[in-house]
């Protein structure tokens, strides 16, 4: 079992780049993926999406990718030699024409040229998707692995709580079933006794049994108890699955609630209504935990 809440982080680098990836996930009815990455790896977004989607089936997932350049490895110097040649030649020519045989040092000219962006440029080297792709995919894969580990750890804790609450609900169900058996027997005896006290010897036994059967049928909760027991068995089986079970559990809880509500509406006995309150409280605890299950 996996929780929908988790966090994963990874950092991978080579001589030119460091790629940092953080992934966090929270509850969501469906799979919702948001990727925030630098523009230079936009072409990798679909591959990143597929990597995450293979591991996560449900939840709101946010992926943050940061790329840091290491040193000047990815920078290149561009010297516009035709312009430099033209400048040097023109300066020397004009110096000779204007000032006679004065010799203008080429080295001195070049020292000044280096500072002029029209002649010397330092630019970011052109990178291709291939240069960063393996680094980014590796970092994303590692972060996803860390995310799944985190989700499984929380899922294990949720599983323990769900099993505890399911057992508590089963205990209440057994106790209610036992009480209901005694209650029905006592109800019959009291109903017959009161009717005989009221009508005396004029009681029509056939009419008495008919009326009693109608009253008992209106308050009969055996079917609901049986269905609730079946739901609990199904619940225990689902908890053992290795796949995403959140939606299935959520549906089953709705069915459990429906049976418990029907029990409460059918029976007027205070004791049974107390059982209903206890069971609804436990089911609500289960529902709160299931909201976080993938």
Image (cartoon, rainbow, N blue to C red):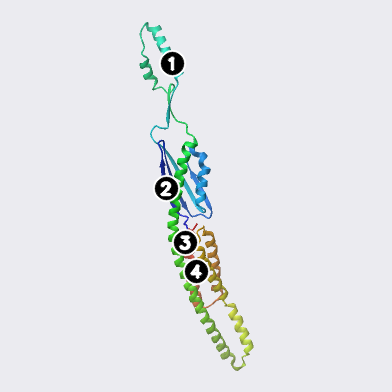
Task: Pick whichever of labels 2 and 4 is earlier in the sequence.
Answer: 2
Pinpoint residue 250: horizontal percent, then vertical percent: 53, 62
Task: Pick whichever of labels 1 and 2 is earlier in the sequence.
Answer: 2
Which one is nearer the viewer's eye here, 265 or 176? 176
Q: Residue at x 41, y 12 (%)?
A: 91
| Alpha carbon distance from label 1 to label 2 | 52 Å
- Tag of residue 85: 1
Residue of label 3: 289
Residue of label 2: 9
SS at badge 3: helix
SS at badge 2: strand
Pinpoint residue 224: horizontal percent, then vertical percent: 56, 73
Which one is nearer the viewer's eye here, 194 or 167? 167
Q: Nearest to the eye among marks 2 and 4: give it.
A: 2
Residue of label 4: 280
Callout 4 environment at 10 Å: few (<14), some (14 to 19), or many (20+)? some
Q: Nearest to the eye among marks 4 and 3: give it.
A: 3
Pinpoint residue 134: horizontal percent, then vertical percent: 47, 40
> Compared to 51, does 15 lie above or below?
above
SS at badge 4: helix
Q: Nearest to the eye among marks 1 and 3: give it.
A: 1
Callout 1 environment at 10 Å: few (<14), some (14 to 19), or many (20+)? few
| Alpha carbon distance from label 1 to label 3 | 75 Å
Callout 3 environment at 10 Å: few (<14), some (14 to 19), or many (20+)? some
Pinpoint residue 151: horizontal percent, then vertical percent: 45, 55
Task: Pick whichever of labels 4 and 1 is earlier in the sequence.
Answer: 1
> Compared to 268, does 14 lie above or below?
above
Task: Pick whichever of labels 1 and 3 is earlier in the sequence.
Answer: 1
């Amino acid at each position: 079992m996996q929780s929908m809440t988790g966090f994963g982080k990874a950092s991978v680098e080579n001589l030119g780049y460091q790629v940092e990836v953080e992934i966090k996930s929270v509850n969501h009815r469906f799979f919702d993926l948001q990727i925030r990455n630098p523009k230079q790896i936009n072409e990798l977004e679909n591959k990143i999406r597929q990597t995450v989607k293979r591991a996560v089936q449900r939840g709101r997932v946010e992926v943050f990718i940061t790329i840091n350049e290491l040193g000047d490895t990815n920078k290149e110097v561009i010297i516009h030699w035709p312009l430099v040649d033209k400048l040097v030649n023109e300066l020397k020519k004009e110096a000779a024409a204007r000032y006679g045989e004065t010799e203008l040092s080429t080295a001195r000219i070049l020292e000044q040229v280096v500072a002029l962006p029209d002649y010397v440029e330092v630019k970011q080297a052109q990178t291709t998707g291939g240069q960063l792709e393996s680094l980014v995919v590796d970092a994303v894969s590692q972060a996803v692995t860390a995310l799944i580990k985190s989700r499984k750890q929380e899922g294990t804790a949720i599983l323990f709580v769900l099993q505890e609450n399911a057992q508590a609900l089963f205990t209440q169900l057994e106790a209610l079933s036992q009480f209901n058996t005694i209650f029905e027997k006592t109800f019959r005896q009291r109903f017959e006794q009161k009717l005989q006290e009221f009508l005396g010897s004029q009681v029509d036994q056939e009419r008495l049994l008919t009326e009693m059967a109608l009253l008992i049928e209106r308050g009969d909760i055996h079917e609901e108890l049986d269905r609730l027991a079946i739901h609990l068995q199904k619940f225990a089986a689902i908890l053992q699955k290795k796949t995403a079970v959140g939606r299935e559990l959520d549906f089953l809880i709705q069915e459990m609630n429906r049976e418990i509500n029907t029990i409460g509406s059918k029976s007027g006995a205070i004791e049974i209504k107390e059982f209903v309150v206890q069971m609804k409280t436990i089911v609500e605890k289960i529902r709160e935990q299931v909201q976080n299950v993938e």
